[in-house]
Image (cartoon, rainbow, N blue to C red):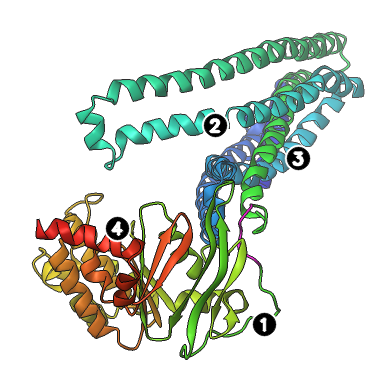
Amino acid sequence: MLGAALIPPAIIWSQGAIIDSAEAALRANATWRAVLPLLIVIFALWTCQMLFGAISGVLQTLLQERVRLKGQSMLLETAGNLDLAFFESPRFYDQLHHARDQMWQLYSSCFGTLTLIQQFLQLSVTISLLLVLHPLAILVLIVTTLPDVVVQAKYARRYYTFDADLIRNSRMSFYLSDIVTNRYNAKEVRVFSLKDYFINQFHYFRNIYIEGYQSLIISEMKVQSVLSILALVGVAGIWTYAVMQTVSGDISAGDLLIVFMASQQSRQQLAGLIRGAGRFYRNSLFVTRFFQFVDLDPKSVEGALEPPRSKDPLPFPYKIRKEIEFRDVCFTYPLNDVQILKKVSFKVPAGGRIAIVGQNGAGKTTIIKLLTRLYDPTEGSIFIDGVDLREYDLQQVRDNISVVFQDFSRYDLAASLNIGLGNVSHVNDLERIREAAIQGGSHETIEELPEGYNTILGKRFDDGVDLSGGEWQHLAISRSFMSPAQVLILDEPTAALDALREHQLFERMAALTKDKTVVFISHRFSTVRMADIIVVIENGEAIEVGPHEELLALNGKYAKMFRTQAARYVA
C-alpha cells in the first residue's frame, strides 16, 4: 500500500515530463526515440500499480478474515466466561447486540489505519508537485478543504448517538424477524396466523430506524455538497492562475498538465483523507462498543458470582465424606425484588439420595442453580464437608457436579457428540459414549438411527434426524453418565416419560449411582419415595424434611400431595 501510494504522483510527473520532452524533440527536430525512456518508465509504473493493487487486494481479504476470526473468538470467550447473572440483564443483551453488530468495525479500524497512512503519503507527494506553480496554491487547496474536518467529526458523533438511541429498536426488529424464521415458533405462528402481525411489527420498527437514518444522511449530504463546491472553487482558482502563468511563459505546457492533474488529484486525495479520517473516527467510536463488551467487569452486574476468597482456592474433595448442607440459604434473582428462597436448611448425606418436591415456582430449580454455583446465595451458605462452597475452586465444583436440567440442551450435532459433551475430555471415546448411552437408556434409539452414533440430530442441517421428547431426555440423561462427577442432579429430566418408564429409569439409575450423591426433582411420588430424604419446598421455604414414611406420619403437606396423587391412580 505504501508502494502504491507513490505511483500516482510519479505517473503525473512522468506525463508532464513526456509532454515537455516531446515538445523539446519537436523544436530540435529529433526523433520520437528521445521520449522512449520516459514511455518505458510510465509503462513500468502502470505495471507496478496493477501488481501492487492485486497483491494489496489479496492481503486485505486475508486481513479481514483474520481480524473477523480474532474478534469472534474474543466475543465468544467473553460470553462463555460471564456468570449467568449477566444473562438476566437486558443491558447485557444491548451490549451483546452492539458487539456483534459492530464487529466488522474491527477490520475497518485496522484497514483504516493503513489507508490513512497510504493516503497521507500519496497526498504529501502529489501536493508537492504544485510547487512548480506557487506555494500559495497548496495553501488555497488546504484552506478550501479543511472545513470538512469539523463536519466529519460532528457527523461521526451524531451517527454514534443515533445508533445508541435506537439499540432497543434494532434488537426488537431482529427478534421479530427471528420469531417468523425459527423452528421453535413455526407451529404457533401458523396455527394462530401470526405471520402478518409479526411482519407488520417488523416493518414498524425498521421504518423508525430508516426514517431517522434517512434524515441524518440527507443532512450530511447537504453540508458535504456545499463544502465540495468550496473545494472546487479553490481548484478553479489554481487552474486559472496556472493558465495565466503558462501563457506568460513562466511555466511549460508539461508543468501546466502537472498542475492540472496534481491540483485535481490533491483535492480528491485531501477530501478522501479527511473523510477517511472521519470514517476512522466514527469506526473508533463504534468499535469501543465491541471492546466494552469483551472488557466487561465480571462484577459489573448484580448477582454475579463472588470472586475467589483466597488467592489459592481449595481443591474440591476427592471424595465427599460427610454431607452437603444448605444452611439458612436465601436467594433473590438479579434485578428482581421477589425473594425466591427464604432461610432454606437441609442436609444431604454423602452417597445419599434426596428428592426435592413442591409446586411449580416454589424454588426447587433455584436450589439446583445454587448448588452448581450458577449463582451464589444472597444470604446463608452451602457447605460441602463443612467448607463453604465458595471456598472451593469453581471449575472443580463444576467438574464434580453433573446436572440434567428440565430445559436441557438439544445439540444439532452427531448423536455421539450429544452424549460425549458430558465430558469433553472424552468426547471422541466411542466406547465410553456407548456405555453412557446404555446406562441412560438411549443406546437402542441411537442404534436404530440411519448412521447410528454418527447420525446428525435435529433439523438444522441436512440429513438431520429429529427425536421425540422422551428420546431427547434419555440422551440428556446419558450425557450426565459421561461425567465422573460425585454429585448427580436431575431437575425433572423425565417429564416426557410416563410414570412407569420414569420409575424404571430411576431404579436403574439408583443401581448405577451407588457411589454418587443423587439430588432429583420430580412430581411423581412413586419415584420420590425412593429417596432417602425428601425436602418439601413451599413459597421458598423448606417446610418439611425427612424420609417418606416419616413425612407420611407427619400428615402434613407432603402426605397431602402424596395421597392426592395416589388417589388419581386408584381412580
Q: Residues within 10 Å of mark 1 (few under 14, many from 20)?
A: few
Q: Label 1 is placed on what type of residue?
A: Asp
| Residue shown at the point (24%, 66%) measured from the top left | 525
Find residue 28 and report its image quarter: top right
Amino acid bearing label 3:
Leu
Point out the tag, 1 or 3, that comes first from the N-terminus.
3
Q: Nearer the viewer, mark 3 or mark 2?
A: 2
Q: Residue at x 30, y 87 (%)?
A: 514
Q: Is residue 182 left or right of residue 227?
A: left
Secondary structure beneath dot 1 equals loop
Residue 37 rendering spot, x and y as whole percentages: 65, 39
Q: Say above or below: 365 vs 256.
A: below
Q: Where is mark 2, residue-wise?
A: 168
- Counting residues from the start of the chain, the first of labels 4 and 1 encountered is 1
In this view, 299 is above or below 225: below
Residue 548 drawn at (x, y percent): 30, 74
List the residue tagged with mark 3: 121
Q: Is residue 303 magenta?
A: yes
Q: Disc 2 vs disc 1: Cβ atoms closer than 8 Å? A: no
Q: Is residue 367 magenta?
A: no
Residue at image position (16%, 58%) is: 567
Identify the disc placed on residue 410. 4
The part of the chain drawn in magenta is: 302-306
Height in image: 411 above or below 56?
Answer: below
The chief SS type of the magenta part is: loop
**Element at label 4:** loop
Q: Earlier in the sequence, mark 4 or mark 2?
A: 2
At a point 22% along the width and 74% down the height, the residue shown is 506
Is residue 50 toward the left or the right of residue 452 in the image? Answer: right
Q: Position of residue 163 (x, y in %)?
A: 61, 29
Inspect the image, locate mark 2, and give the three-letter code of the amino acid beneath it: Arg
Between residues 118 and 211, which one lies in front from this camera angle?
211
